[in-house]
Image (spheres, grey):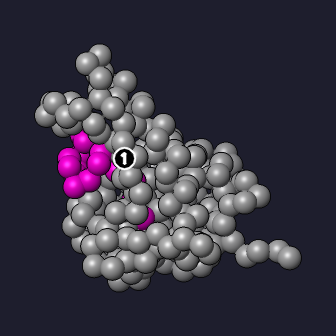
Amino acid sequence: MTVSKGNIAVLLSGRGSNFESIFRHSQKPESLYRVAVVISDRSGAPGLAKASGFGLDAYHVGRKKYRSKNEFETAILDILKGYPIDLICLAGYMKIVGSVLLQAFPRRILNIHPALLPSFPGLDAQKKALEYGVKISGCTVHFVNRGVDQGPIILQKAVEVTEKDNLESLSRRILKQEHQIYPRAIDLYFQNRLEIRGRRVHIIHGQ
């Protein structure tokens, strides 16, 4: 029996490392999702070129073309309506998601962050962790809400910070773990195993 896979949209702004990991996992027989479309707010984003190279529909939607954030997100939403999309995955998307997308996809937008939230939200998380002197850092997959990196947490992976670490080495080891837990979180979503109760995401077992 053929199992229908969920459609995801990937929003990105940069090199597309997590996007590539998500896409390659989607090609495995056991994966429960397919990447239907990739959208970037930056025309020169390497991730956008990667998407085109994989044969995916890839779009650039530039913020400066629109008078307001709502108009910008409405343009993105108009693209998404053509597929249709079950879940949005932010992969290095450097814009704060606004009300248009949040209302259209309630609890259907995921993000990956290179820190153990709620520590070090926002930009330069690895740099902040090093400067603070933490012994453990890591990465977090969470649902997106109106706050910056404040949505309910789905999965986290800890990464030890060693005395020899610099920004490059720590970022590289955290990124390796990001590539593991993000596709896993997406599969859990499409397995209907994620239940949000208040701030906590419960992973339902035995299905």
Q: Is residue 1 magenta?
A: no
Residue that sits furthest to the front in the current view: 206
Vertical order, 147 against 40 (above or below): below
Q: Position of residue 119 (x, y in %)?
A: 20, 49
Magenta residues: mostly which secondary structure?
Answer: loop
Q: Is residue 79 visible?
A: no
Residue at point 28%, 79% (across, down): 198
**Is 89 displayed left or right of 200 in the figure?**
right
Residue lying at 53% horizontally and 46% vertically, measured from the top left: 180
Front in this rendered view, residue 89 or 192: 192
Point out residue 191 in the picture as x, y percentages from the top left corner. 60, 72
In the image, residue 111 lies in the stretch drawn in magenta = yes
Quick one: which residue is furthest to the top in this view?
164
* Tag 1: amino acid: Cys
- Name, please, the residue furthest toward the right: 1
Residue at disc 1, secondary structure: strand
Image location of residue 123, percent across then percent down? 24, 46
Quadrant containing the C terminus in the rendered view: bottom right
Q: Which residue is mark 1?
A: 139
The residue located at (27%, 73%) in the rendering is 199
Q: Residue at x 45, y 45 (%)?
A: 178
59 vs 132, left or right, is right
Residue range of the region highlighted in magenta in the rendering:
110-126
